Image (tube, rainbow, N blue to C red):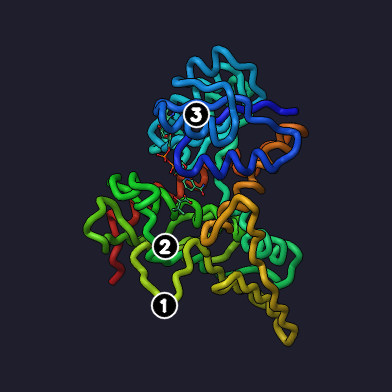
Amino acid sequence: MLKGALIGCGFFSRNHLHAWRQLEGVDIVALCDTDAQRLSAMAAEFDIRRTYASAEQLFAREQLDFVDIATTVRSHRALVEMAAKARVPCICQKPFAPTLEDARAMVAACSSAGVPLMVHENFRWQKPVQAVHRAVREGAIGTPFWGRFSFRSAFDVYQAQPYLAEGQRFILEDLGIHILDVARFLLGDAKVIGSSTQRVNQRIKGEDVATILLSHQAGATSVVDCSYASAREQELFPQTLIEVDGSEGSIRVDAGYRLTVHRLGGGTRIDSCEPPLHAWAERPWFNIQDSVLKIQAHWLECLRHKYEPQTSGRDNLRTLELVESAYSAAGAPRVVR
Ligand code: NAD
Ligand code: 89V
């Protein structure tokens, strides 16, 4: 039985705790939060007896196989460095760090302590994204040359996550980071060749629309477009729509988790890639919730077999580089005459 602790008992951590409870061979033995009310509410709901108001105390008193950090970004560096110092393998929620400098320092700290580190970058574990990955890898559409990864919604994300309305940076740092990671996962590493950001909702501080053009090392071009200002007849939160065109066909993930794989010269396969609705999950979040279960299962496999997680800290630096490049390119647009 692997023994873990969770730091940060806020809105999203309930999904982590439900998923840990569903997985076999793992037990969350302790919780930590600086907010006493949240800590005791979560401890009662999940019947976890040992609670800590500070991470220092947690690391000093517990013998852990891993720690799961589900706090917001500003606290990540200090907590990951504490885990490295205590030689405790750690998972850290996204966004991994507010700057590349912090992210590189966190990766270095874990690497020199020999401590496994995974960023909780769960979107690539969503069922539709995994289905597209499988089809591309199996050669169903030949060599991919173009993609579009699109997340457009007007869902009120600020209600459950008020901090999203408060930062100078918003959609690229919070959501674009996931969609850029999906683009990397499906089409390989990339460079930003153009980017634009907009703020439509004037009641928030950061940008709520972002459009990024990517050039992938393997030759494909893709568009990543994200919006929380797009009211549409059918609200699709939190679905990512996907288009990938290849030399031998195309793949589409359309609204309602509809997967179409079409082969040049005939043969179209249409399937549902709707994720399961776990007993603890709810619509519309169930797609994200299932991916939490999947990434946590991956972490357990990695710990048991000593594999590097797919979204290790080292890997996530490349996603963070795309986020930073997208902000820079949006801030200094190049006009070609
Ligand atoms: P939240 O503000 O509701 O909860 C964060 C909790 O961490 C709070 O209870 C706070 O008191 C606690 N905390 C902060 N610093 C701490 C410290 N140093 N020690 C102990 N406790 C500390 O935030 P949330 O909405 O639950 O989001 C948490 C993280 O999860 C964010 O980074 C967010 O971007 C991410 N998130 C990820 C997904 C996903 O699909 N991967 C979805 C939603 C949120
Ligand atoms: O998945 C996330 O990181 C969330 C949301 C889907 C609301 O952007 O913050």
For disc 2, the marked residue is 226
336 in relation to 102, above or below:
below
Q: Is mark 1 within 8 Å of ligand 2?
A: no
Figure quadrant of the N terminus: top right
Q: Residue 273 or 38: which is nearer the viewer?
A: 38
Distance between the Cα atoms at labels 3 and 1? 43 Å
23 in relation to 211, above or below:
above
Distance between the Cα atoms at labels 2 and 1? 17 Å
The residue depicted at 44 percent of the width and 24 percent of the height is: 78
Number of residues whose C-alpha sits closer than 10 Å to that of mark 1, classed few (under 14), some (14–19) or many (20 or more):
few
Mark 1: which amino acid? Glu
274 in relation to 115, above or below:
below
Q: Position of residue 97 (x, y in %)?
A: 43, 37
Q: Are marks 2 and 3 in contact (CB under 8 Å)?
A: no
Tell which circle, 2 or 3, labels the residue nearer the N-terminal end. Answer: 3
Secondary structure state at the residue bearing disc 3? helix
For disc 1, the marked residue is 233
Distance between the Cα atoms at labels 2 and 3? 28 Å
Number of residues whose C-alpha sits closer than 10 Å to that of mark 3, classed few (under 14), some (14–19) or many (20 or more):
many
Mark 3: which amino acid? Met
For disc 3, the marked residue is 106
